[in-house]
Amino acid sequence: MDAKDRQIIRELQKDGRLTNQELAERVNLSPSPCLRRLRNLEAAAVITGYTALVDQKAYGLPITVFVRIRLERHSEETIRGFESQIARLDEVLDCHLLAGGDDYLLRVIVASLEAYEDFIRRRIRAIPGIASIDTSFAYGVVKQTRVYPA
């Protein structure tokens, strides 16, 4: 991947609905080479898909929660079980494996505090092997981007 490929990616991250003609103009290529590069990036799974960015409040899920999870033990069975169950929870948008005191950081969105309580009581606590759950509620967004640094 070269600088031109990165430029194509950044432009698509800014606006995934660009036509090939518009993309080519923005990255200073003619349309054919631009499309060839784009197809190569898709074929190499550098570009893994396209999606719509949706306002979560307008969608009806205004509450963002960051949940730190620590496991009781780090056996292969416990880890595999936890990760497979987390992957099935629609409320969990991101799950990151951490170094340090906690094992995982989840980004969760829900409709209300009651919905979050239900999510923790019925869905998270049902997962075996969890030693602790620590919650932080986000009350604002300072920066949110999907565009990678140059």
Image (cartoon, rainbow, N blue to C red):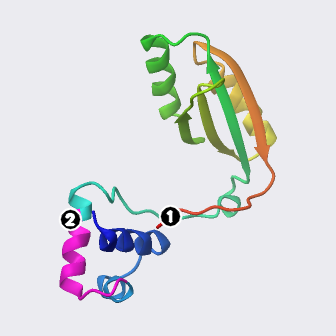
Q: Nearer the viewer, residue 19 or 70?
A: 70
Whole-percent x, y for residue 99 in the image: 57, 28
Whole-percent x, y for residue 148 in the image: 49, 62
**Which secondary structure lies at badge 2?**
helix
Q: Determine the image quadrant of residue 18.
A: bottom left
**Which secondary structure lies at badge 1?**
loop
Q: Nearer the viewer, residue 48 or 149?
A: 149
Residue found 33% across the figure and 60% down from its top: 47
Mark 1 / mark 2, whichever is N-terminal: 2
Where does label 1 land, which residue?
149
Asked if marks 1 and 2 touch (Cβ < 8 Å), the reply is no
Q: Label 2 neighbourhood size at 10 Å, few (<14), some (14-19), many (20+)?
A: some
Write the start and end of the magenta stretch as one range: 27-40
Dominant secondary structure of the residues highlighted in magenta in the image? helix
Residue found 22% across the figure and 77% down from its top: 35
Q: Nearer the viewer, residue 137 or 52?
A: 137
Q: Is residue 79 above or below residue 46?
A: above
Task: Please say whether residue 39 is one of the residues in the magenta stretch.
Answer: yes
Residue found 38% across the figure and 73% down from its top: 7
Q: Determine the image quadrant of residue 106.
A: top right
Q: Label 1 neighbourhood size at 10 Å, few (<14), some (14-19), many (20+)?
A: few
Whole-percent x, y for residue 45 in the image: 27, 54
Where does label 2 land, which residue?
40
Looking at the rendered structure, the kind of residue marked 2 is: Asn
The answer to whether any part of residue 16 appears in the image is: no
Distance of mark 1 from mark 2, alpha carbons?
21 Å
Q: Nearer the viewer, residue 52 or 15?
A: 15
Whole-percent x, y for residue 134 in the image: 74, 28
Q: Is residue 77 above or below residue 56?
A: above
